Amino acid sequence: MTDGFTITVDGKPVAAQPGETVLRACQRAGISIPTLCDDKRLDPAGACRACLVEVEGQRRLQPSCAWNAVPNQVVKTQVTSPRVQKHQDLLVSLYMADHKLDDSGLPVETCNGNDLRAWATQCRPVALEPVEAPRAARPGDKNPYIQFNPELCVLCARCTRYCDEIEAVNAITLTGRGSETTIGTAGMRGLLDTTCELCGGCIDTCPTGALVEKKAIEFLPHHIERKVRTTCNYCGVGCQMDLNVARVDGVEKVVRVTSPPPGETVNDGNLCIKGRFAYDFIHHKDRITEPMIRKADGRLHAVSWDEALKFAAEGMNRVKQRHGPGALGFISSARCTGEENFLMGKVARAAFKTGNIHSCAAT
Ligand code: SF4
Ligand code: SF4
Ligand code: FES
C-alpha cells in the first residue's frame, strides 16, 4: 500500500490514500454522507448531487464521490456546513416532488428499501408542488423477475452502469430527453427480448426500489426476520448469498435471495440468475427433504440419516467384497463445495480403495 495522508473533515483528521475519493475516506472513518448514485463497484458518476461537500478553496460544492482526497484538504459535510445542509434540504425536496410518497409524506418504502426515504428523514424537506412523473414504464415487459417502477426512479444510472461496467451486457440504458428520461431498452422491448441475462444486479444496486424483484414485492424490509448467509450450490464458484427469511402463515420461508454487500465475499455483491432468483425449489412440495430407502415392499420409505448411511455403506461393501473395489464408482458434483468434493475423494480412495471417481466439473 502506498503512503497515506491526512485530510480534515468537519475539523477532525481523517486518513486517506492516494487516488481515493473524499467519500471513501469519510466512509472508512464512519462519517455519514448521503449518496444515491454511488456504488463501490462502479466508476464515479457524480450524477445525483446528494454527496456534495464544501472543499476549502473551491467556490462550488463538490461531489465527494467523484472528488479525490489530497494531503491537507479541508472538507465540511452537512454536520458543520449550513450551506451543505441547505443544499441537501432543497435537493431532497426536489427529488420528493417527483417521487411516490406514502401517507406520512415520505418516499415510499419498497421491498428493496429506499435510500431516498432514509435520507429525507435526516433533512428538512420543503413542500414543493408535486410533478406527475412523465417517465415511461415498460408495460409490455413480461419477464418473470424484474419490475421497473418509473415513479420511484431518481435517474442515478446505477442500474445502467452496473449492466455496462459489471455485466458488460448493456441491456438497459438511459433513454429519452429532459424530464422524460427513463430507463429503457432497445425499442422499449421487454427484458426477455434483449441481451439481458436476468442477473438481477440492477435490482441489487438500485437505491430507491425503482427496480424490484417481482416475487418479493409483498415483503417489505421489516418483514424479513433474519438473513442466513450460505454458499450458492448451483456451481462451484462459491458465491455467498443471503437467504432472506420471513414468516408466512406462521411458517418461516425464504422469500428472497440477496448478495452480501460488495467487498465482503468472493462474488463482490454479484449473483447470477440462478443464485438470485431460482430459490422456489426450497419450499417446493415435491422436494425430498429426508433420506429414503427402497425396502422389500418395493416402495421408498423415509429413514434417519444414520440408517440411510449404514444401508449405503453395507451395500457398497458387499459389492466390493464380491467384485473388488474396481466395481465401485463415485460421481461427485460441481454443485458441491470444494470441501465436499475433497471428502468424496477420500471416501473413494481411502475408504473403498478405488480411483473410480469423477466430477461433472471435469467434463
Ligand atoms: S438483470 Fe443484469 S443483465 Fe439484465 S438489465 Fe439488469 S443488470 Fe443488465
Ligand atoms: S432504476 Fe434505480 S438504479 Fe436505475 S436509474 Fe432509476 S433509481 Fe437509479
Ligand atoms: S453519490 Fe455523489 S453525486 Fe451521487
Image: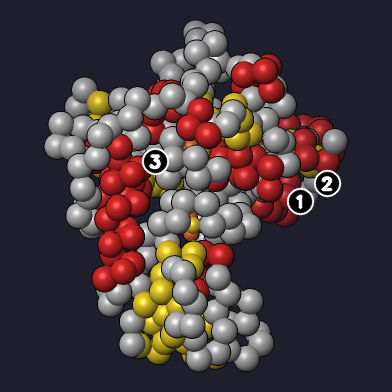
> Are the residues at dot 2 and dot 1 in contact (C-beta closer than 8 Å)?
yes
Q: Is residue 301 above or below residue 171?
A: above
- Going from N to C along the chain, the mark reached first, 3 or 2, is 3
Which residue is more in the foreground, 175 or 107? 175
Lateral position of residue 34 relative to residue 358, left or right: left
**Label 2 Cα neighbours within 10 Å, binned few <14 / some 14-19 / many ≥20:** some
Tell me which amino acid carries mark 1: Arg
Question: Mark 3 falls on what kind of element?
Answer: loop
Which residue is more in the foreground, 292 or 206? 206
From the image, tell me which residue sits under label 2: 355
From the image, tell me which residue sits under label 1: 349
Rendered residue at 39%/27% (across/down) = 133
> Are the residues at dot 3 and dot 2 in contact (C-beta closer than 8 Å)?
no
From the image, tell me which residue sits under label 3: 208
Rendered residue at 38%/33% (across/down) = 152
Rendered residue at 49%/77% (across/down) = 58
**Label 3 Cα neighbours within 10 Å, binned few <14 / some 14-19 / many ≥20:** many
Of discs 3 and 2, which sits in the foreground?
3
- Going from N to C along the chain, the mark reached first, 2 or 1, is 1
Tell me which amino acid carries mark 2: Gly
Separation of residues labelled 2 and 1 (CA atoms) = 6 Å
Separation of residues labelled 3 and 1 (CA atoms) = 53 Å
Rendered residue at 61%/39% (across/down) = 160
Lateral position of residue 173 relative to residue 211, left or right: right
Measured as percent of width and height from the top left, residue 146 is found at: 51, 26
Tell me which amino acid carries mark 3: Thr
